[in-house]
Amino acid sequence: MNRKSCKYNKIINLKQNKPIIEIKNERTLFSGILLKDDKKVGVISGWTEEVPNAFDILQLRTRNLYFKLPCGDIIANGLSDVYGNNNLLDKKHYTAITGGTNKYSNITGEILTKRNNDETYNHTIYIKYL
């Protein structure tokens, strides 16, 4: 089954400005403004952390994303193997929605994140209400 054949109740497309980044040891903390049609609609914050890799095959990182939107928060977590030497997302990546608040308290789904050449990000949030 591919994503196009999945039935989602709602899809939200958001752009994120260039994030503020702080690196502390193996953890990268970040925050940014979320935009829809060039208007601020919320904020994103989160962190990634390197996972020890005994096989030196991939650089694995945990991803924790928090989307603060007008009708509630969306929380997403997952693993990533797509980071370059700059500790930033280099290509598209899917993260599982693990929870939410208010309007999003009863959802599942995933978030597609793409890093743009200008260091902004696009987030497509695929929501399925339970």
Image (tube, grey):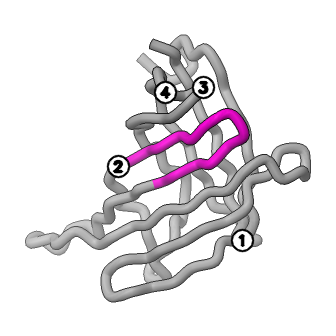
Q: Name the residue that disc number 4 marks.
A: 105
Marks 2 & 4, CB-CB < 8 Å contact: no
Question: Residue extending furthest left?
Answer: 54
Left or right? Give the position of 32 relative to 111.
right
The type of residue carrying mark 3 is Lys
How many numbered discs? 4
Amino acid type assigned to the residue bearing label 4 in the image:
Ser
Residue drawn at x 61%, y 57% as measured from the top left: 44
What amino acid type is highlighted by mark number 2?
Gly
Q: Residue 10 in the image: state x and y as whole percent.
A: 65, 20
The tag earlier along the polypeptide, 2 or 4, is 2
Q: Secondary structure at mark 4?
A: loop
User: Mark 3 sits on what residue?
Assistant: 103
Examine the rendered structure and indicate whether residue 123 appears above or below residue 128: below
Residue 18 part of the magenta segment: no
Give the mark toward the camera: 4 or 1: 4
